[in-house]
């Protein structure tokens, strides 16, 4: 995996860059829609291409259970299986240690878990995680880790960090032994919200030598100020010449704050999960399509959007689809929401190229920040798209 910085913006840690991996070349900062089970929910691969998506995320744990990594290998790999010509990043399965904690037992060599599907027992090790990601022919492979919950004591966070680092060594050795040219692997910084642990974890991961580095264990309930402190810690501790990935953080205003702190890659289920519940993302904030005020509105979902949905159908029609339970409603909103995210990233990259990111961020945050009295946002999850 190759990464080069093409533009930097004075007064900010933000940078515009380019990643080449698996025969695909794309610009950063970049948002990756989540396609947990080899599908970004409701959207086809050609939808994603039209929208301008260069990379999708798939999940090792879920693909291991169904349809099975050996089956995907026999069918020509994940790209062929899902008819996707862009790049694919695969999560390692480590997040499921956090999200499915009641079904898991962490051991020195890996994690024993019961399938959430049928209760069958399985053992996930760093080597198996790498084997699965190799079998599905992932372009960007994540090291196997433990996502530390919030709150956690320093002792618990340190213990899980040590496991993450031990597994990172084994993940790297297995990845390099696979001999897959043109692919990349990223190590994951853990340590909870303890700055000294995250600094130590980052430094030890860098000594192992990965192609890029992710910040994990954030957006799991910690205060916003603490999250940004940890991200800034990563900007200081991780090498500038490698890409940085902030896992599971994806509100538009959060993306702007993270780019300002040197982050290059993002993923989150919010645009598609929100779409299934009638949430419309625009550059002027979010609204609910089910509100009665849209019942006779012939305008587009977003006046400023260039997506096919906004060029074709009205708010009134999309609201009607949700009112009568038609599956087309969530599909249309997913298409629009993902395009809104792509437009945001295009604007960010353009402002970085022109040296005006700080002003772009300020103007966008003024438009995006929720108005006083808005219902607080709920917790985010990365389990499904």
Image (spheres, rainbow, N blue to C red):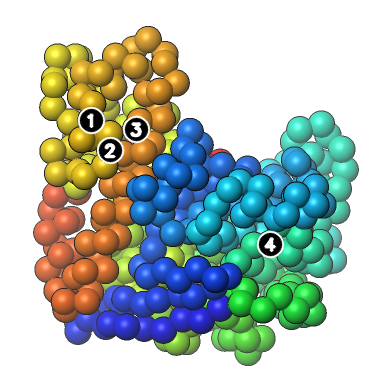
Crowding at dot 3, Cα within 10 Å, few <14 / some 14-19 / many 20+, comes out as many
Crowding at dot 2, Cα within 10 Å, few <14 / some 14-19 / many 20+, comes out as some
Q: How far is the residue under mark 4 from the one under mark 2?
A: 31 Å
* 124 sits left or right of 63 in the view: right
- Residue to which mark 2 is pinned: 308
The answer to whether marks 2 and 3 mark residues whose Cβ atoms lie closer than 8 Å is no
Q: Give the secondary structure at mark 2.
A: helix
Q: Which of marks 2 and 3 is in front?
A: 2
The answer to whether marks 1 and 2 mark residues whose Cβ atoms lie closer than 8 Å is yes
The answer to whether marks 1 and 3 mark residues whose Cβ atoms lie closer than 8 Å is no
The residue lying at 40 percent from left, 27 percent from top is 330
Q: Position of residue 276 (x, y in %)?
A: 42, 29
Q: How far is the residue under mark 1 from the one under mark 3?
A: 13 Å
- Residue to which mark 3 is pinned: 333
Q: How far is the residue under mark 1 from the one under mark 2?
A: 6 Å
The answer to whether marks 3 and 4 mark residues whose Cβ atoms lie closer than 8 Å is no
Q: How far is the residue under mark 3 from the one under mark 4?
A: 30 Å
Quadrant hosting residue 315: top left
Asked if 181 appears above or below 53 in the picture, the reply is below
- Residue to which mark 1 is pinned: 312
- Residue to which mark 4 is pinned: 137
Q: Can residue 106 be seen in this view?
A: no
């Amino acid at each position: 995996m190759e990464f080069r910085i093409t533009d930097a913006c004075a007064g900010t840690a933000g940078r515009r860059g380019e990643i080449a991996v698996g025969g695909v070349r794309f610009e950063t900062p970049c948002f990756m829609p989540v396609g947990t089970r080899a599908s970004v929910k409701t959207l086809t691969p050609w939808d994603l291409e039209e929208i301008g998506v260069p990379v999708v995320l798939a999940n090792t744990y879920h693909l291991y259970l169904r349809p099975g990594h050996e089956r995907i290998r026999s069918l020509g790999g994940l790209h062929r299986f899902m008819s996707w010509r862009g790049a694919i990043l695969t999560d390692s399965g480590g997040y499921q240690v956090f999200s499915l904690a009641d079904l898991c037992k962490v051991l020195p060599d890996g994690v024993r878990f019961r399938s959430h599907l049928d209760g069958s027992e399985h053992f996930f090790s760093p080597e198996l995680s790498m084997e699965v990601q190799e079998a599905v022919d992932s372009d960007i492979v994540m090291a196997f880790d433990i996502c530390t919950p919030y709150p956690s004591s320093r002792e618990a966070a340190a213990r899980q960090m040590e496991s993450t680092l031990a597994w990172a060594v084994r993940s790297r050795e297995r990845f390099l032994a696979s001999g897959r040219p043109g692919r990349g692997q990223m190590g994951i910084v853990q340590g909870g919200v303890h700055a000294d642990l995250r600094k130590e974890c980052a430094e030890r991961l860098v000594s192992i030598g990965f192609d890029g580095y992710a910040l994990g264990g954030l957006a799991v309930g910690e205060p916003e100020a603490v999250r940004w402190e940890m991200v800034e810690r990563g900007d200081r501790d991780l090498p500038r010449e490698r890409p940085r990935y902030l896992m599971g953080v994806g509100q538009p205003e959060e993306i702007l704050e993270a780019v300002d702190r040197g982050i290059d890659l993002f993923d989150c289920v919010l645009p598609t999960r929100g779409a299934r519940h009638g949430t419309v993302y625009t550059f002027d904030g979010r609204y609910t399509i089910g509100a009665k005020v849209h019942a006779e509105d012939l305008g587009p979902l977003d006046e400023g959007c260039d997506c096919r949905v906004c060029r074709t159908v009205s708010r009134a029609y999309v609201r009607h689809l949700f009112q009568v339970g038609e599956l087309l409603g969530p599909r249309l909103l997913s298409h629009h929401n993902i395009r809104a995210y792509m437009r945001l990233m295009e604007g960010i990259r353009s402002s970085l190229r022109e040296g005006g990111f700080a002003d772009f961020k300020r103007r966008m945050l003024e438009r995006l920040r929720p108005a006083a009295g808005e219902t607080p946002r709920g917790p985010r999850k990365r389990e499904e798209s």
